[in-house]
Image (cartoon, coloured by chain):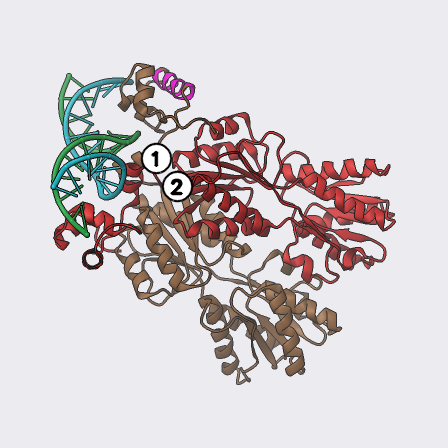
Chain colours: A brown, B red, C cyan, D green
DNA sequence: GTGAAAGCGCTAACAC
DNA sequence: GTGTTAGCGCTTTCAC
């Protein structure tokens, strides 16, 4: 940390290089019309006085920030991290940088966050989920930038959508168990109404069970989202204590599914012999666990890269109408359910 | 997405509310000296025309961005996610927002990233690790903002430090195994020299083994960092094939340690009966695995919150000299090594 | 390929 | 508690 004397500006670089500030500005852009000789002289002059380009001034004058705002429920979640990576990698070549915020699975927090992010004047905004407060919706509608909702397929999207139906995905899982002759199926999820994707999955479970004419009341609430491995284990304990004849369990995510599996192991309950287990998300743990966990792969990385592609398409004028990109989660049947 | 007519500015709000732009500016600040009545009128006027405060202009004029730049090796890592959360929560009350970038465990990428981040004029910058390219170092030294290196205890810090010695931490693990009478100890890590923390851990392993007069050549390179569960499992497979008399394994992280554990389970190798396993990081999987994994908790959340506290202290003038905050990782001896 | 003038939308500094 | 003036450091626009 050096002394806090005033940082050099383009004017300083220009003086040193014997050109106008405008030429320095051009030298720092990609395509600009500066002769190679001048550019090199300028960049060297800049380096010699430790000049660092000031985006804040550039942002204001050009009315461009090269930010893409993104909200995710949690930083500490491998699925959302994959989506972020798909986004980030897809935007990096264009010099677009992600401005990230997390909502803690709370749409009220999302509202605060979205407003804060929009103040930074991003070029586009990507949000996780399709349910928002009325004010969040209004803010996004008025933002005059591309809006992309992900990880869901809302009935009335704000703008673009890249996602899948959480309810339909769980229906596929129920169908799988029923086809294998299992009927006493339980669902382990979070307390109602916080995590909207978790709620959609629980409701998808209930609807699918009813469609099969089966009892849809084996619902274990494992706590506030996100449900951890530990909470999954505790939930499985309660399930085994209260409804010991349960034949199969669908957990809201692979993390809770793995926790449930370990609880079975601790109690000597055979998986899948006495009870089958399935998760959601195709986290690495699902493949590596012994037995490996049946799960759904929602292609989180692809959600991010498709969203990134969409942003570039809109910014370049190739996409002028609201897009709806449906991702089809893949059912992965593994040892924990066969 | 509404039509792209020009977004309202403070001047528009001022006109509508019958005050000067300056009063509008004050109404949008926390502490400012505006009467409650005027403030409410202003905020309502703003809301009625969909005004959203423009940070880009504020940033330039006030020479303050309320950004704290952070670089981490990977987004998809629970340890770094915890550090981020500690940082984020510690800074949020002051209205400081994190500007995040990931380096992919590559100090050349870190250099590009740091320059890009500094252009945004953050109030402080937090980097993971204490090894950087010469240019990164120079950029950080000249930035005239607080610099905090984390997850390491470099000999010659750039500014402030919040971290621990990765080598010393692994030494404690080796001591634990030796005290239990185990001597044929292997280390599973990444290919040399990419992930500097991983390299430090491997070198700490080698030094500790030699200090005990033990063979330090059981080193399995599991691939490019970060080492996944799968790679940990594959590495354990190779270890069991080539050095079947190994008594204990220290893995560079809990994820690879868990992978190693599952490989033992698949092969019917008793853990800890025939082989003891330890990881690093105290990820949730370490506690939930059966058997639970011996590991080291480096208090990643605390690293973040201490860094956040340090930033506030420096910005408020309470801390004027470079701080060195040493975190002491805790050895957690669990079933996998006893 | 380069330069001059003007201004992006706020807020620092000062006045009252 | 509120207003006026000037300007942050770039880039747009136009000129040559």
SS at mark 2? loop
User: Same chain for marks 1 and 2?
Assistant: yes
Q: Residue A131 carries which label?
A: none
Magenta-span inclusion, residue A42 = yes
Task: Give the left or right position of residue A195, taking residue B262 as reference.
Answer: left
Let me know if residue B323 appears in the view. Answer: yes
Q: In this view, does A153 lie above or below A37?
A: below
Residue B242 drawn at (x, y percent): 83, 44
Mark 1 belongs to chain: A
The count of marks equals 2
Q: Quadrant of residue A154?
A: bottom left
Residue A247 in which image quadrant: bottom right
Query: In the image, residue A275 lies at what x, y percent?
Result: 68, 75
The residue beneath circle 2 is A96
- Magenta range is A38-48
Q: Earlier in the sequence, mark 1 or mark 2?
A: 1
Q: What secondary structure is marked by label 1?
A: helix
Mark on residue A55? 1
Q: Mark 1 or mark 2, which is nearer to you?
A: 1
Residue A258 spot, x, y in % from top left:
64, 65
């Amino acid at each position: 940390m050096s002394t806090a004397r005033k940082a050099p500006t383009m004017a300083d670089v220009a003086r040193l290089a014997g050109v106008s500030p405008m030429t320095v500005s051009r030298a720092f852009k990609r395509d600009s019309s500066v002769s190679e000789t001048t550019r090199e002289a300028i960049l060297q002059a800049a380096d010699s006085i430790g000049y660092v380009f000031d985006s804040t001034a550039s942002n204001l004058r050009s009315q461009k920030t090269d930010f893409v705002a993104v909200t995710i429920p949690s930083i500490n979640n491998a699925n959302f991290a994959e989506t972020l990576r798909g986004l980030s990698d897809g935007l990096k070549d264009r010099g677009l940088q992600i401005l990230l915020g997390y909502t803690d699975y709370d749409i009220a927090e999302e509202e605060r966050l979205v407003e804060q992010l929009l103040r930074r004047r991003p070029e586009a905004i990507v949000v996780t989920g399709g349910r928002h407060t009325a004010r969040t919706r209004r803010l996004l509608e008025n933002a005059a930038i591309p809006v992309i909702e992900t990880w869901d397929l809302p009935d009335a999207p704000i703008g673009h959508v890249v996602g899948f139906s959480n309810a339909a995905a769980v229906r596929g899982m129920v169908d799988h168990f029923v086809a294998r002759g299992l009927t006493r199926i339980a669902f382990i999820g979070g307390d109602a109404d916080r995590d909207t994707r978790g709620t959609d999955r629980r409701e998808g479970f209930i609807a699918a069970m009813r469609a099969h004419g089966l009892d849809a009341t084996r619902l274990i609430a494992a706590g506030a989202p996100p449900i951890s491995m530990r909470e999954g284990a505790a939930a499985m304990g309660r399930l085994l204590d209260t409804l010991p004849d349960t034949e199969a369990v669908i957990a809201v995510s692979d993390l809770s599914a793995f926790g449930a599996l370990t609880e079975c192991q601790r109690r000597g309950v055979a998986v899948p012999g006495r009870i089958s287990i399935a998760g959601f998300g195709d986290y690495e743990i699902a493949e590596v666990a012994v037995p490996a966990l049946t799960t759904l792969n929602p292609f989180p990385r692809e959600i991010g890269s498709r969203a990134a592609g969409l942003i570039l398409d809109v910014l370049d004028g190739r996409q002028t109408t609201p897009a709806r990109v449906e991702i089809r989660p893949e059912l992965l049947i593994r040892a924990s359910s066969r």
